[in-house]
Amino acid sequence: MRRQFDDVLLGSIELFCLAAEIGSFTGAALAAGVTPAAVSRSVSRLEERLGARLFVRTTRSIRLTEGGRAYHQQCRSALNQMLEAERELMGQQQEPTGTLRISLPTTYGHYRILPLLPEFRRRCPQVKVDINLSNRNIDFVDEGYDMAIRVRAQPDSGLIARQLEDAALVVVATPEYLASAGVPQHLDDLARHECIQFELPSSGRRISWLFTDNGAPCEILGEGAYVCSDDVLGGVTLAKYGAGLFQTYRFIVERELADGSLVEVLQSYAGRSRPYTLLYPHGRHVPLRLRAFIEFLMEKRKGWGA
Protein backbone atom coordinates (compact mmCIF):
# COMPACT_ATOMS: atom_id res chain seq x y z
CA MET A 1 0.00 0.00 0.00
CA ARG A 2 1.32 3.43 -0.92
CA ARG A 3 2.17 5.70 2.01
CA GLN A 4 -0.26 8.55 2.51
CA PHE A 5 1.87 10.52 5.00
CA ASP A 6 5.65 10.90 4.98
CA ASP A 7 7.78 12.27 7.82
CA VAL A 8 7.86 15.76 6.29
CA LEU A 9 4.07 15.92 6.07
CA LEU A 10 3.58 14.73 9.65
CA GLY A 11 6.10 17.34 10.81
CA SER A 12 4.22 19.99 8.84
CA ILE A 13 0.97 19.02 10.56
CA GLU A 14 2.62 19.35 13.98
CA LEU A 15 3.98 22.79 13.15
CA PHE A 16 0.61 23.86 11.75
CA CYS A 17 -1.10 22.83 15.00
CA LEU A 18 1.48 24.72 17.06
CA ALA A 19 0.99 27.87 14.97
CA ALA A 20 -2.81 27.57 15.27
CA GLU A 21 -2.65 27.16 19.06
CA ILE A 22 -0.03 29.85 19.71
CA GLY A 23 -1.41 32.23 17.08
CA SER A 24 2.00 33.06 15.64
CA PHE A 25 4.52 31.52 13.26
CA THR A 26 7.33 33.01 15.35
CA GLY A 27 5.91 31.60 18.58
CA ALA A 28 5.46 28.18 17.01
CA ALA A 29 9.03 28.30 15.71
CA LEU A 30 10.39 29.11 19.21
CA ALA A 31 8.33 26.29 20.75
CA ALA A 32 9.51 23.76 18.14
CA GLY A 33 13.12 24.93 17.92
CA VAL A 34 12.98 25.79 14.22
CA THR A 35 12.94 29.01 12.21
CA PRO A 36 9.78 31.02 11.44
CA ALA A 37 10.53 30.39 7.76
CA ALA A 38 10.35 26.64 8.39
CA VAL A 39 6.91 27.03 9.98
CA SER A 40 5.73 29.18 7.06
CA ARG A 41 7.01 26.62 4.53
CA SER A 42 5.25 23.80 6.40
CA VAL A 43 1.94 25.63 6.38
CA SER A 44 2.33 26.50 2.69
CA ARG A 45 3.10 22.84 1.98
CA LEU A 46 -0.15 21.78 3.66
CA GLU A 47 -2.19 24.47 1.90
CA GLU A 48 -0.83 23.32 -1.46
CA ARG A 49 -1.65 19.69 -0.66
CA LEU A 50 -5.18 20.56 0.51
CA GLY A 51 -5.91 23.19 -2.11
CA ALA A 52 -7.25 25.50 0.57
CA ARG A 53 -6.01 28.35 2.76
CA LEU A 54 -5.54 27.47 6.43
CA PHE A 55 -4.64 30.93 7.74
CA VAL A 56 -5.54 34.51 6.96
CA ARG A 57 -2.20 36.33 7.22
CA THR A 58 -1.50 40.00 7.86
CA THR A 59 1.79 41.73 8.62
CA ARG A 60 1.05 41.54 12.35
CA SER A 61 -1.05 38.45 12.94
CA ILE A 62 -2.46 35.20 11.65
CA ARG A 63 -5.89 33.66 12.19
CA LEU A 64 -7.40 30.38 11.09
CA THR A 65 -9.87 30.28 8.25
CA GLU A 66 -13.10 28.36 8.80
CA GLY A 67 -11.62 25.38 7.00
CA GLY A 68 -8.41 25.81 8.97
CA ARG A 69 -10.29 25.59 12.28
CA ALA A 70 -11.97 22.34 11.29
CA TYR A 71 -8.67 20.91 9.98
CA HIS A 72 -6.85 21.91 13.17
CA GLN A 73 -9.40 20.24 15.44
CA GLN A 74 -9.12 16.95 13.60
CA CYS A 75 -5.33 17.10 13.29
CA ARG A 76 -4.89 17.88 16.99
CA SER A 77 -7.24 15.06 17.92
CA ALA A 78 -5.28 12.63 15.71
CA LEU A 79 -1.91 13.73 17.12
CA ASN A 80 -3.19 13.38 20.69
CA GLN A 81 -4.50 9.90 19.97
CA MET A 82 -1.15 8.82 18.51
CA LEU A 83 0.69 10.22 21.52
CA GLU A 84 -1.62 8.51 24.00
CA ALA A 85 -1.42 5.20 22.14
CA GLU A 86 2.37 5.41 22.20
CA ARG A 87 2.45 6.19 25.91
CA GLU A 88 0.15 3.32 26.76
CA LEU A 89 2.10 0.87 24.61
CA MET A 90 5.36 1.92 26.26
CA GLY A 91 3.80 1.70 29.71
CA GLN A 92 4.50 5.36 30.43
CA GLN A 93 0.93 6.39 31.16
CA GLN A 94 0.13 4.85 34.50
CA GLU A 95 -2.75 7.23 35.23
CA PRO A 96 -5.17 9.28 33.13
CA THR A 97 -3.92 12.68 31.99
CA GLY A 98 -5.01 15.51 29.71
CA THR A 99 -8.25 17.43 29.23
CA LEU A 100 -11.59 15.64 29.16
CA ARG A 101 -14.15 17.55 27.07
CA ILE A 102 -17.75 16.64 27.89
CA SER A 103 -21.12 18.03 26.83
CA LEU A 104 -24.02 17.75 29.28
CA PRO A 105 -27.70 18.74 29.29
CA THR A 106 -28.26 21.54 31.79
CA THR A 107 -30.55 19.57 34.10
CA TYR A 108 -28.56 16.35 34.15
CA GLY A 109 -25.34 18.26 34.42
CA HIS A 110 -26.38 20.24 37.51
CA TYR A 111 -28.07 17.40 39.38
CA ARG A 112 -26.15 14.28 38.36
CA ILE A 113 -22.71 14.91 36.85
CA LEU A 114 -21.27 18.17 38.21
CA PRO A 115 -21.60 17.07 41.87
CA LEU A 116 -19.48 13.98 41.03
CA LEU A 117 -16.59 15.75 39.31
CA PRO A 118 -14.60 16.67 42.45
CA GLU A 119 -14.57 12.98 43.44
CA PHE A 120 -13.50 11.98 39.92
CA ARG A 121 -10.63 14.47 40.01
CA ARG A 122 -9.51 13.18 43.40
CA ARG A 123 -9.19 9.79 41.74
CA CYS A 124 -7.61 11.21 38.57
CA PRO A 125 -5.86 14.43 39.61
CA GLN A 126 -3.97 14.76 36.31
CA VAL A 127 -7.21 15.11 34.33
CA LYS A 128 -8.69 18.54 33.66
CA VAL A 129 -12.40 18.74 32.79
CA ASP A 130 -13.81 21.08 30.13
CA ILE A 131 -17.62 21.15 30.53
CA ASN A 132 -20.21 22.35 28.04
CA LEU A 133 -23.66 22.76 29.59
CA SER A 134 -26.31 23.02 26.88
CA ASN A 135 -29.24 21.13 25.41
CA ARG A 136 -28.08 21.28 21.80
CA ASN A 137 -26.62 18.42 19.80
CA ILE A 138 -22.86 18.72 19.39
CA ASP A 139 -20.52 17.55 16.63
CA PHE A 140 -17.82 15.35 18.16
CA VAL A 141 -15.33 15.82 15.32
CA ASP A 142 -15.77 19.51 14.55
CA GLU A 143 -16.04 20.58 18.20
CA GLY A 144 -13.53 18.15 19.69
CA TYR A 145 -15.65 16.57 22.44
CA ASP A 146 -14.71 13.26 24.05
CA MET A 147 -18.23 12.38 25.15
CA ALA A 148 -21.75 13.69 25.65
CA ILE A 149 -24.83 12.76 27.68
CA ARG A 150 -28.24 13.18 26.09
CA VAL A 151 -31.86 12.30 26.71
CA ARG A 152 -33.76 10.56 23.91
CA ALA A 153 -30.49 10.09 21.97
CA GLN A 154 -31.09 9.27 18.31
CA PRO A 155 -29.39 6.15 16.85
CA ASP A 156 -26.08 7.01 15.21
CA SER A 157 -23.81 4.31 13.77
CA GLY A 158 -20.81 6.54 14.41
CA LEU A 159 -21.42 6.66 18.17
CA ILE A 160 -21.26 4.15 21.00
CA ALA A 161 -24.22 4.56 23.39
CA ARG A 162 -24.35 3.35 26.98
CA GLN A 163 -27.48 3.95 29.01
CA LEU A 164 -26.97 5.64 32.37
CA GLU A 165 -30.50 5.49 33.74
CA ASP A 166 -34.22 5.69 33.10
CA ALA A 167 -35.06 8.89 34.95
CA ALA A 168 -38.47 8.69 36.63
CA LEU A 169 -40.97 11.50 36.00
CA VAL A 170 -43.23 13.14 38.60
CA VAL A 171 -45.84 15.90 38.58
CA VAL A 172 -45.37 18.39 41.41
CA ALA A 173 -46.78 21.61 42.84
CA THR A 174 -46.57 23.59 46.07
CA PRO A 175 -49.00 22.91 48.94
CA GLU A 176 -50.20 26.51 48.59
CA TYR A 177 -51.07 26.08 44.91
CA LEU A 178 -52.91 22.84 45.61
CA ALA A 179 -54.83 24.42 48.51
CA SER A 180 -55.99 27.15 46.13
CA ALA A 181 -56.56 25.20 42.89
CA GLY A 182 -57.39 21.77 44.29
CA VAL A 183 -55.52 18.48 44.04
CA PRO A 184 -55.96 16.75 40.65
CA GLN A 185 -57.27 13.20 41.08
CA HIS A 186 -57.65 12.17 37.42
CA LEU A 187 -55.87 13.08 34.20
CA ASP A 188 -58.98 14.93 33.02
CA ASP A 189 -58.50 17.33 35.95
CA LEU A 190 -55.37 18.76 34.30
CA ALA A 191 -57.60 20.77 31.96
CA ARG A 192 -58.60 22.91 34.96
CA HIS A 193 -55.05 23.54 36.18
CA GLU A 194 -52.08 25.72 35.33
CA CYS A 195 -49.78 23.24 33.59
CA ILE A 196 -46.34 24.78 33.12
CA GLN A 197 -45.06 23.84 29.68
CA PHE A 198 -41.55 23.23 28.32
CA GLU A 199 -40.84 24.02 24.67
CA LEU A 200 -37.98 22.57 22.66
CA PRO A 201 -36.02 25.52 21.21
CA SER A 202 -34.87 23.48 18.21
CA SER A 203 -38.39 22.74 16.97
CA GLY A 204 -40.74 24.98 18.97
CA ARG A 205 -42.63 21.82 19.97
CA ARG A 206 -44.02 21.58 23.48
CA ILE A 207 -43.17 18.42 25.40
CA SER A 208 -46.10 16.20 26.32
CA TRP A 209 -46.43 14.90 29.87
CA LEU A 210 -46.08 11.13 30.13
CA PHE A 211 -48.42 8.94 32.20
CA THR A 212 -49.64 5.38 32.64
CA ASP A 213 -53.42 4.94 32.55
CA ASN A 214 -54.73 1.46 33.44
CA GLY A 215 -51.35 -0.01 32.55
CA ALA A 216 -51.17 1.70 29.14
CA PRO A 217 -48.81 4.58 28.34
CA CYS A 218 -50.42 7.89 27.42
CA GLU A 219 -49.38 11.47 26.75
CA ILE A 220 -51.11 14.73 27.63
CA LEU A 221 -50.28 18.23 26.44
CA GLY A 222 -51.67 20.55 29.09
CA GLU A 223 -52.42 24.25 28.92
CA GLY A 224 -51.30 27.11 31.10
CA ALA A 225 -50.03 30.66 31.26
CA TYR A 226 -46.34 29.69 31.47
CA VAL A 227 -44.08 28.28 28.77
CA CYS A 228 -40.32 27.78 29.28
CA SER A 229 -37.77 26.92 26.61
CA ASP A 230 -34.17 25.74 26.53
CA ASP A 231 -33.73 25.15 30.29
CA VAL A 232 -36.11 22.74 32.05
CA LEU A 233 -35.07 24.15 35.42
CA GLY A 234 -37.14 27.25 34.60
CA GLY A 235 -40.29 25.15 34.91
CA VAL A 236 -39.08 23.68 38.21
CA THR A 237 -38.45 27.15 39.63
CA LEU A 238 -41.91 28.33 38.58
CA ALA A 239 -43.49 25.33 40.28
CA LYS A 240 -41.49 26.00 43.47
CA TYR A 241 -42.99 29.48 43.63
CA GLY A 242 -46.58 28.35 43.18
CA ALA A 243 -47.10 29.01 39.46
CA GLY A 244 -48.79 25.66 38.84
CA LEU A 245 -48.14 21.99 38.12
CA PHE A 246 -44.99 20.79 36.39
CA GLN A 247 -43.75 17.38 35.26
CA THR A 248 -40.05 16.92 35.87
CA TYR A 249 -37.52 14.28 36.86
CA ARG A 250 -37.78 12.90 40.38
CA PHE A 251 -34.04 13.32 40.96
CA ILE A 252 -34.40 17.10 40.55
CA VAL A 253 -37.07 17.54 43.24
CA GLU A 254 -36.17 14.78 45.71
CA ARG A 255 -35.15 17.29 48.38
CA GLU A 256 -38.30 19.40 47.98
CA LEU A 257 -40.52 16.32 48.09
CA ALA A 258 -38.75 15.20 51.26
CA ASP A 259 -39.14 18.55 53.07
CA GLY A 260 -42.72 19.10 51.86
CA SER A 261 -42.11 22.30 49.89
CA LEU A 262 -43.34 20.40 46.81
CA VAL A 263 -45.99 17.67 46.68
CA GLU A 264 -46.28 14.88 44.12
CA VAL A 265 -49.73 14.49 42.53
CA LEU A 266 -51.35 11.97 40.19
CA GLN A 267 -49.22 9.19 41.68
CA SER A 268 -51.62 6.50 40.46
CA TYR A 269 -50.76 7.56 36.89
CA ALA A 270 -46.98 7.64 37.42
CA GLY A 271 -44.39 5.12 36.28
CA ARG A 272 -43.07 6.78 33.13
CA SER A 273 -39.45 7.78 32.58
CA ARG A 274 -36.97 9.04 29.99
CA PRO A 275 -33.58 7.46 29.27
CA TYR A 276 -30.28 9.29 29.67
CA THR A 277 -27.48 7.96 27.49
CA LEU A 278 -23.71 8.40 27.43
CA LEU A 279 -22.34 8.83 23.90
CA TYR A 280 -18.81 8.76 22.50
CA PRO A 281 -17.32 8.23 19.02
CA HIS A 282 -17.03 4.71 17.67
CA GLY A 283 -14.01 3.23 15.95
CA ARG A 284 -11.25 5.35 17.44
CA HIS A 285 -8.65 5.05 20.16
CA VAL A 286 -10.39 5.78 23.46
CA PRO A 287 -8.14 7.94 25.66
CA LEU A 288 -7.37 6.59 29.12
CA ARG A 289 -9.00 9.66 30.71
CA LEU A 290 -12.28 8.91 28.89
CA ARG A 291 -12.20 5.24 29.80
CA ALA A 292 -11.60 6.18 33.44
CA PHE A 293 -14.54 8.62 33.43
CA ILE A 294 -16.90 6.12 31.78
CA GLU A 295 -15.99 3.47 34.36
CA PHE A 296 -16.53 6.04 37.11
CA LEU A 297 -20.03 6.90 35.82
CA MET A 298 -20.95 3.23 35.38
CA GLU A 299 -20.04 2.72 39.03
CA LYS A 300 -22.08 5.72 40.20
CA ARG A 301 -25.15 4.87 38.12
CA LYS A 302 -25.85 1.88 40.36
CA GLY A 303 -27.27 4.30 42.91
CA TRP A 304 -29.53 6.01 40.39
CA GLY A 305 -31.95 3.14 39.82
CA ALA A 306 -30.53 2.49 36.34
Image (cartoon, rainbow, N blue to C red):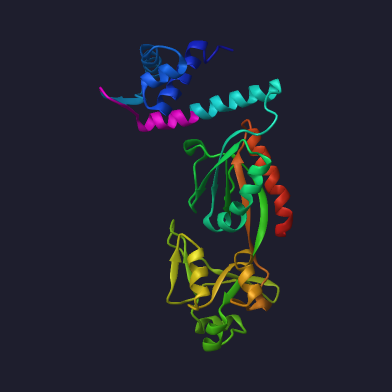
Residue 210 higher or lower than 294, as above or below: below
Position in image of residue 214 (x %, y %) = 69, 77
Which residue is at the front of the view, 91 or 200?
A: 91
Which residue is at the front of the view, 164 or 192?
A: 164
- The magenta stretch is 59-74
Residue at point 63%, 30% (across, down): 285
Residue at point 52%, 87% (across, down): 181
Question: In the displayed structure, does residue 144 sit left or right of residue 83?
Answer: left
Residue at point 63%, 73% (across, down): 257
Question: In the displayed structure, does residue 164 sit left or right of residue 193?
Answer: right
- How many discs appear? 0
Residue 232 higher or lower than 54, as above or below: below
Please identify the quarter of the rendering in which residue 254 is found: bottom right
Residue 266 higher or lower than 3, as above or below: below
Residue 193 higher or lower than 96, as above or below: below
Please identify the quarter of the rendering in which residue 179 is found: bottom right
Question: In the displayed structure, does residue 168 sit left or right of residue 43?
Answer: right
Is residue 239 something that shows in the picture? yes
Please identify the quarter of the rendering in which residue 15 is found: top left
The answer to if 147 sits in the magenta stretch is: no
Is residue 153 something that shows in the picture? no
The extreme left residue here reads 59
Residue at point 68%, 39% (across, down): 292
Position in image of residue 79 (x %, y %) = 54, 24
Position in image of residue 106 (x %, y %) = 52, 56
Which residue is at the front of the view, 145 or 242?
A: 242
Locate the N terminus by quadrant. top right
Locate the C terminus by quadrant. bottom right
The answer to if 63 sits in the magenta stretch is: yes
